[in-house]
Image: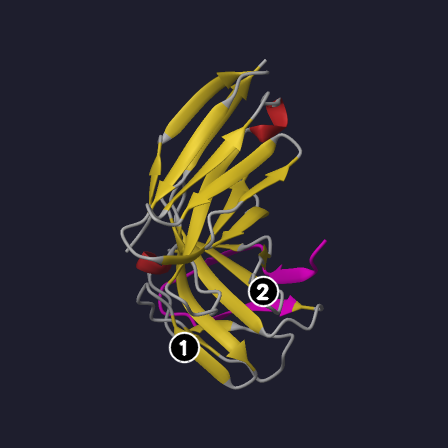
Amino acid sequence: QQPVQSPQAVILREGEDAVINCSSSKALYSVHWYRQKHGEAPVFLMILLKGGEQKGHEKISASFNEKKQQSSLYLTASQLSYSGTYFCGTERGSSNTGKLIFGQGTTLQVKP
Amino acid sequence: EADIYQTPRYLVIGTGKKITLECSQTMGHDKMYWYQQDPGMELHLIHYSYGVNSTEKGDLSSESTVSRIRTEHFPLTLESARPSHTSQYLCASSLPGVKNIQYFGAGTRLSVL
């Protein structure tokens, strides 16, 4: 089952914050976050394994609530370079296959 | 930075032609993947490989086939291209271990007329 992302689209001004959510109806082994700019390949941002951890990368961080099967991506003090489409990819169950099911994506546009 | 290469980048071809999309990685990754992505849409896994001589279909049904004779090479073949095959095809490989972080190639944009 495909994870559901919300919101579908976000428009921000530089310096504003955003939160992108990813929800699954199935038990998850891991949640991956990728960013894809128009016409380019997806680029890995971070991974969260089951255990409810929170990870950070400069001004981008994420959390994983294992009980709710939800992950959130936090973008702080957004920059123009953050524009793109964000996808969460989920790996189900307890297996370590690497096979991901991606959400429908959240388009983020950061304006000056 | 990951080294994963896809050729061609763009391909326009007529209906009924046989095509092979190439994907190579130089990192020695065991796991490799093919995804199909329509413009503005999500990625769908169409093929997966655990390693040499190991392939299986993904969640999205596809008329394409793959082979994995060498670790570094994972080509995708369409025996008879149709307009419904028009899409972007992305290849990825992942690091060994529990995290399976995937690195993507630049993709092949296929247009079947």
Alpha-carbon neighbours of circle 1 within 10 Å: few (<14), some, or many (≥20)?
Answer: some
**Camera-side residue: A61 or B8?**
A61
Rendered position, B71 above or below A76: below
Query: Which residue is at a point 40% across and 40% down the rendered structure image?
Result: A105
Say yes or no: labels 2 and 1 on the same chain.
yes
Q: SS of the residue at dot 1?
A: strand
Q: How many marks?
A: 2
Q: Which residue is mark 1?
A: B56
Query: Which residue is at a point 50% across and 75% down the rendered structure image?
Result: B49
Rendered position, A11 above or below B52: above
Question: What is the spatial separation of the Cα atoms under label 2 and label 1, in whole angstroms?
Answer: 15 Å
- Circle number at residue B17: none
Q: Which segment did they paint magenta?
A: B1-24
Question: Magenta span has B12?
Answer: yes
Residue B22 makes an appearance in the image: yes
**Camera-side residue: A111 or A21?**
A21
The image shows residue A64 at horizontal and vertical percentages of: 45, 45
Q: Which residue is mark 2?
A: B93
| Residue type at numbered disc 2 | Ser
Q: Quadrant of residue A26?
A: bottom left
The image shows residue A8 at horizontal and vertical percentages of: 35, 32
The image shows residue B53 at horizontal and vertical percentages of: 52, 86
| Residue type at numbered disc 1 | Glu
**Camera-side residue: B31 or B106?**
B31
